[in-house]
Amino acid sequence: MNTRIVFSEKCLGYGGFHIEGPQRVKIAHEVLKEKGYEFLEPEAASEEDLLRVHDHEYIWNLKKGLVEDPDTPAYENIYEFARLSAGGALLAAKVNGFSLTRPPGHHAGRSGAALGVYTRGFCYVNNIAVAVKALGKQALILDVDGHHGNGTQEIFQGDEKVTYVSLHRFPHYPGTGLASEGNCLNFPLPADCGEGVFLETLDRALGMVDLGNVEVVAVSAGFDTHKGDLASLGLTEKSYGKIGFRIRALRKPAFFVLEGGYKGEQNGNDIDQLLRGFEGRP
Ligand code: Q9C
Ligand code: ZN
């Protein structure tokens, strides 16, 4: 077993009634522990790390807790939880690991809600963007969460170092990502399209990327595409193994950052399959 999991009990310390609650990572952690994975404890990202991605005013407001929207509660100390989750992505980038932390990040844009969307979809800081900016490398960001990463697209739109590829359910929250724009390649998919369509689309998407100058693959690993979850595309546990195998086939250093996925045990099993596929472990 190669890929280590970045996790901290601290990220269980807020929320509870919201669908984006502690159980989704707590139980996933237990499942992965049972399977023998190794864990690393992250440190909080610094304000400097966050400011490579977000503007001063947004970070100021986040610190003061003035960032509530109908999807995204202003929990007490959410700034600290969000910094730790971003720190998870930084550590995952450093060790080519998997960051199993919350809150998620891909709907958070430069100054909050992104691309004209009215909410931040449970996100405060764009964790994967913090990690990619800190690396400063030519990156492919592959977003397989079932929702379009409108925050990530906004942050990297026109950035010559980054190609953003997203497969997502459409029409669905957040409503963006219908068409590709420059360095952002979007693949909208109908609800419950199933593994066959998903993998064909993934192959087509990856075939369009010029891998020649890609130094690292950053995966926004969301599991709400699992059949019955929030943005279901009808995938099963095994589907994530096949996705992992396709990431392996890119032959680049990679790291993974949790986005959505709202059923803890399912997340644990899906992560295990993804990493098995990625590592070529049967
Ligand atoms: N207000 C992630 O998977 N649903 N976020 C909104 C209408 C928001 C999902 C419903 C879904 C956000 C990280
Ligand atoms: Zn999602």
Image: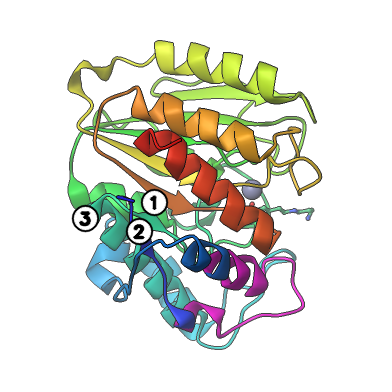
- Quick check: marks 1 and 2 in contact, CB under 8 Å? yes
Tell me the mark number nearer the camera, choosing from 3 and 1: 3
Mark 1 element type: helix
Q: Which residue is mark 3?
A: 94
* Relative height, residue 269 to residue 208 (above, below): below
Image spot of residue 5 (x, y percent): 38, 61
Marks 3/1: CA distance?
12 Å
Q: Nearer the viewer, residue 89 or 48?
A: 89
Q: Which residue is mark 2?
A: 89
Q: Nearer the viewer, residue 167 or 194?
A: 194
> From where the camera sits, is residue 156 visible?
no
Q: Which residue is mark 1?
A: 128
Amino acid identity at mark 1: Ile
Q: Earlier in the sequence, mark 3 or mark 1?
A: 3
Q: Which segment is the magenta one?
A: 10-29
The label shown at residue 52 is none
Mark 3 element type: helix
